[in-house]
């Protein structure tokens, strides 16, 4: 099986460097004129799949908005994942899981083993029990051509208190995470399968991302306050592995499918204008 990094590199080349979230929170369902129940959840998800599944490189469902409806919500999530894969999009499930031992192994089996009904191309993960605690996820991903995006520098205001704290070697917690993921991607071509989540709103924090060799997921664009131009400030001169991620900025134009497609096209054009240039 091809590695996730290889598939992602090809998808970004063919469809463009863009991820779009599926975040069916109650306010957005209401804005679309849908009920805040499983029926509304399914209709919302189907509409996004129909509008964007065959044109966006990566679609990122947020698991929590499905889990809140219990088993019926998870059934909708399973269906949404299947529909997205059939449409040709890579599915990045935003679950931010993290644990130790058998528990993290079970998370890995749930999302990264092809035998699972929740099997996706990649997941997000939290490293704050130690990056090494995520080893079963990395191993399962490698065995089945999957990917893992590990939280490094997030956009939320509470993040720096932990992520910018320094250890005995002088590195910040975030830099330690960055360096360990960089080691996992050593020698990978054309792109490693282990990525980082780095918020587009964080500005220049002085962290070194130059050796990651994997995808850099950049949420926070659009409604959360960052613009495509901010990517240069955050990521520096090499933007070739950056995967910008939009949610409300695109989803807010639904439920009209043509309007959703047009919003995604505008977001992609904005990102191409920045990512297609190298800052000297």
Image (cartoon, rainbow, N blue to C red):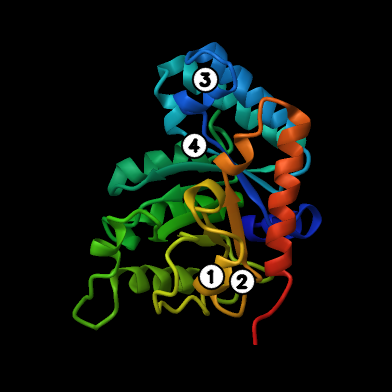
Which of the two discs, 4 and 1, labels the residue nearer the N terminus? Answer: 4
109 to 80, vertically: above or below: below
Determine contact: label 3, label 4, CB under 8 Å.
no
The x and y percentages for residue 205 are 39, 74
In the image, what residue occupies the spot 56% across and 42% down? 247
Mark 1 and mark 2: span between their CA atoms? 5 Å
- Occupied quadrant, residue 77: top right
Determine contact: label 1, label 2, CB under 8 Å.
yes
Which of the two discs, 3 and 4, labels the residue nearer the N terminus? Answer: 3
Mark 3 and mark 4: span between their CA atoms? 18 Å
Is residue 146 visible in the rendered image? The answer is no
The x and y percentages for residue 128 are 28, 56
Mark 2 and mark 3: span between their CA atoms? 44 Å
Q: Quadrant of the C terminus?
A: bottom right
In the image, what residue occupies the spot 59% across and 22% down? 32
Mark 3 lies on residue: 30
In the image, what residue occupies the spot 63% across and 40% down? 250
- Mark 2 vs mark 3: in front: 3
Residue 51 left/right relative to 150? right
Mark 1 lies on residue: 185
Task: Check disc 1 and report its element: helix, strand or loop.
Answer: loop
Which of the two discs, 2 and 4, labels the residue nearer the N terminus? Answer: 4
Which numbered dot is residue 62?
A: 4
- Mark 2 vs mark 4: in front: 4
In the image, what residue occupies the spot 33% across and 61% down? 132
Mark 2 lies on residue: 188
Mark 2 and mark 4: span between their CA atoms? 28 Å
Which of the two discs, 2 and 3, labels the residue nearer the N terminus? Answer: 3
For the view shown, which residue lies furthest in the bottom direction? 280
């Amino acid at each position: 099986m091809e590695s996730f990094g290889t598939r992602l590199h090809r998808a970004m080349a063919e469809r463009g460097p863009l991820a779009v979230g599926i975040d069916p929170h109650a306010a957005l369902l209401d804005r679309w004129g849908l009920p805040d129940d499983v029926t509304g959840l399914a209709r919302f998800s189907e509409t996004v799949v129909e509008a964007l599944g065959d044109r966006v490189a990566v679609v990122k469902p947020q698991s929590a908005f499905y889990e809140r409806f219990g088993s019926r919500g998870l059934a909708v999530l399973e269906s949404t994942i299947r529909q997205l894969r059939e449409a040709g999009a890579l599915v990045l499930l935003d679950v931010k899981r993290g644990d130790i031992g058998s528990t993290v192994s079970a998370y890995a089996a749930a999302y990264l083993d092809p035998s699972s009904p929740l099997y996706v191309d990649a997941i997000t993960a939290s490293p704050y029990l130690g990056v090494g605690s995520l080893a079963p996820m990395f191993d399962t991903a490698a065995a089945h051509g999957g990917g893992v995006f590990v939280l490094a520098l997030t956009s939320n205001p509470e993040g720096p208190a932990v992520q910018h704290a320094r250890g005995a070697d002088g590195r910040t917690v975030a830099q330690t995470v960055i360096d360990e993921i960089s080691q996992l991607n050593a020698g990978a071509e054309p792109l490693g399968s282990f990525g980082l989540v780095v918020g587009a709103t964080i500005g220049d924090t002085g962290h070194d991302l130059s050796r990651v060799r994997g995808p850099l997921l950049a949420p926070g664009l659009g409604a959360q306050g960052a613009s495509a131009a901010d990517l240069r400030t955050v990521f520096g001169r090499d933007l070739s592995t950056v995967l910008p991620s939009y949610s409300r900025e695109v989803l807010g134009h639904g439920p009209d499918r043509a309007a959703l497609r047009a919003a995604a096209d505008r977001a992609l054009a904005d990102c191409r204008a920045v990512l297609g240039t190298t800052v000297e």
